[in-house]
Image (cartoon, grey):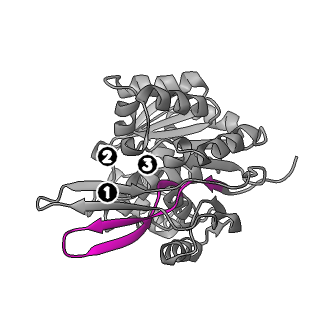
Amino acid sequence: MPERSGALVIGEALMDLVDDGTSITRSPGGSPANVALGLARLGVETRLRTALGPDDDGRAILERLEGSGVGVDPESLSLERTSTALAVLDASGAAMYDFDIEWRLPSPVAADSAAVVHSGSIALFLEPGASVVADALASRPADVLVSLDPNIRPALLGERSEVRATFESLAATADLVKLSDEDAEWLYPGEPLGDVLDRLLDLGVALAAATRGGDGAILATRAARVEVESLPVQVRDTVGAGDTFMAALIAGVLQLDGRAALAELGEADLLRLGRFAATAAGVTVSRVGADLPTADEVARAQQAAAVDRGTTGAAGTVVW
């Protein structure tokens, strides 16, 4: 069996624009691109297949990703112009959104060299690229783990029943699925969050996780279920928090010995993994923008949190 390592992320990268009436600020975004960035900063060898244009926005996104160690596939330069998401703020700060997004992958994506392949958000649902993503997940070798985050964007989606069917079809191929409480409410209105996690486990997901903002997160396998608290920090903004949590979960999962070990995680291991991810997300929300942390930054925040809990480990190490 060939040696596999690191992560392959397939999904959109775009430029986020915020118009406050006096100026427009631009910052690289896109949930899968953020996850790739987070993985690389955590020390995981990471490759990204996305779709960019040969323009200033595309070059800025490439510079940010490659500057943090993400290997962006050359085939990713496939669009005439880079996708954008514009938020126009009114006097009260409320936003109206205008999306100019194209998700197209002109060639198949081989998911046979990485230990885990991750996708999420727009990439799972917007055609024609969504079909290429689904084919890549379905055709990956049996020992390659699959990670998903639906990161629902209702303005870009069709009927709820069709989106739910697509999500469940993809989740049935996945080993790790993370969703937010808002994602769960949109997909399964009125259904308790714990029941949504049960749905995912029944589909065959080995580890299902749900984030709840400041209320922490829930992690569940068939063997155990735990709640983890959010890191107590002064929140600057929440941009990129969910993507950070996702990246940290994947980084932790890569330390396990395959799918069987993932499904058998007990309470103690789930708590360590969940606290690692929550700590990483806490670092992100403590600063402005989707500025995902490095492994050293998470280690320092973990050590401080462990002191507060009276469970210190070796200083300077990341203990998921």
Question: Is 271 left or right of 53, judged from the image as shown?
Answer: left
Can you name the residue that lies furthest to the right here? 1
Can you name the residue that lies furthest to the left here? 91
Give the residue pinned by disc 2. Answer: 213
Residue 317 appears at what percent x and percent y?
53, 63
| Quarter of the rendering containing residue 218 | top left
Cα distance, mark 3 to mark 2? 14 Å
Residue 161 appears at what percent x and percent y?
45, 25
Give the residue pinned by disc 1. Answer: 238
| Residues drawn in magenta | 8-32
Residue found at x 67% / y 46%:
132
**What is the secondary structure assignment of the residue under circle 3?**
helix
Pointers 2 and 1 in contact (C-beta within 8 Å): yes
Q: Amino acid at mark 2?
A: Gly
Residue 120 appears at what percent x and percent y?
53, 46
**What is the secondary structure assignment of the residue under circle 1?**
loop
3 over 60 or under it: above or below: above
Residue found at x 55% / y 43%:
124
Can you name the residue that lies furthest to the front here? 80
The residue nearer to you, when weighing 141 against 80, is: 80
**Mark toward the start of the polypeptide (2 vs 1):** 2
**Mark toward the start of the polypeptide (3 vs 2):** 2
Pointers 3 and 2 in contact (C-beta within 8 Å): no
The residue nearer to you, when weighing 102 against 176, is: 102
Q: Can residue 247 be seen from the camera position used here?
A: yes
**What is the secondary structure assignment of the residue under circle 2?**
helix
| Quarter of the rendering containing residue 182 | top left
Cα distance, mark 2 to mark 1? 9 Å
Give the residue pinned by disc 3. Answer: 275
Question: Is 127 left or right of 284, judged from the image as shown?
Answer: right
